[in-house]
Image (cartoon, rainbow, N blue to C red):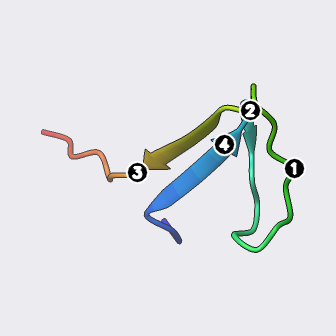
């Protein structure tokens, strides 16, 4: 796992943190923290 997080803008993953995006009143931004799964 390279990054510990990812984020989505209107259900589309942003590939680079410095990507330029246009936000509107209805834009939904979602931040997801990635955690490794631990098995038995």
Examine the rendered structure and indicate whether residue 4 appears above or below residue 10: below
Residue 25 horizontal side relative to residue 28, left or right: right
Secondary element at tag 3: strand
Question: Residue at position x 85%, y 55% from top?
Answer: 21
Q: Which mark is residue 33?
A: 3
Q: Please name the residue that numbered disc 2 is placed on.
A: 27
Question: Residue at position x 48%, y 58% from top?
Answer: 5
Distance from Cα at disc 1 to Cα at disc 4: 13 Å
Q: In the current view of this chain or complex, which residue is farthest to the front?
A: 25
Q: Please name the residue that numbered disc 1 is placed on.
A: 22
Give the quadrant of the C terminus: top left
Viewer-proximal residue among 33 and 39? 33
Occupied quadrant, residue 29 = top right
Q: Residues within 10 Å of mark 4 (few under 14, many from 20)?
A: some
Q: Earlier in the sequence, mark 1 or mark 3?
A: 1
Q: Earlier in the sequence, mark 1 or mark 2?
A: 1
Residue 26 horizontal side relative to residue 4, left or right: right
Q: Residues within 10 Å of mark 3 (few under 14, many from 20)?
A: few
Distance from Cα at disc 2 to Cα at disc 4: 10 Å
Examine the rendered structure and indicate whether residue 22 appears above or below residue 39: below
Q: In the current view of this chain or complex, which residue is farthest to the top?
A: 26
Contact flag, marks 1 and 3 (Cβ < 8 Å): no
Question: Residue at position x 41%, y 51% from top?
Answer: 34
Q: Earlier in the sequence, mark 2 or mark 4?
A: 4
Q: Please name the residue that numbered disc 4 is placed on.
A: 8
Secondary element at tag 4: strand
Q: Earlier in the sequence, mark 4 or mark 3?
A: 4
Viewer-proximal residue among 32 and 25? 25
Residue 29 horizontal side relative to residue 22, left or right: left
Distance from Cα at disc 4 to Cα at disc 3: 12 Å
Q: Nearer the viewer, mark 1 or mark 4?
A: 1
Examine the rendered structure and indicate whether residue 12 appears above or below residue 6: above
């Amino acid at each position: 796992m390279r990054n510990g997080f990812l984020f989505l803008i209107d259900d589309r993953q942003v590939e680079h943190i410095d990507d330029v995006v246009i936000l509107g009143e209805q834009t939904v931004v979602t931040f997801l923290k990635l955690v490794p799964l631990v098995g038995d």
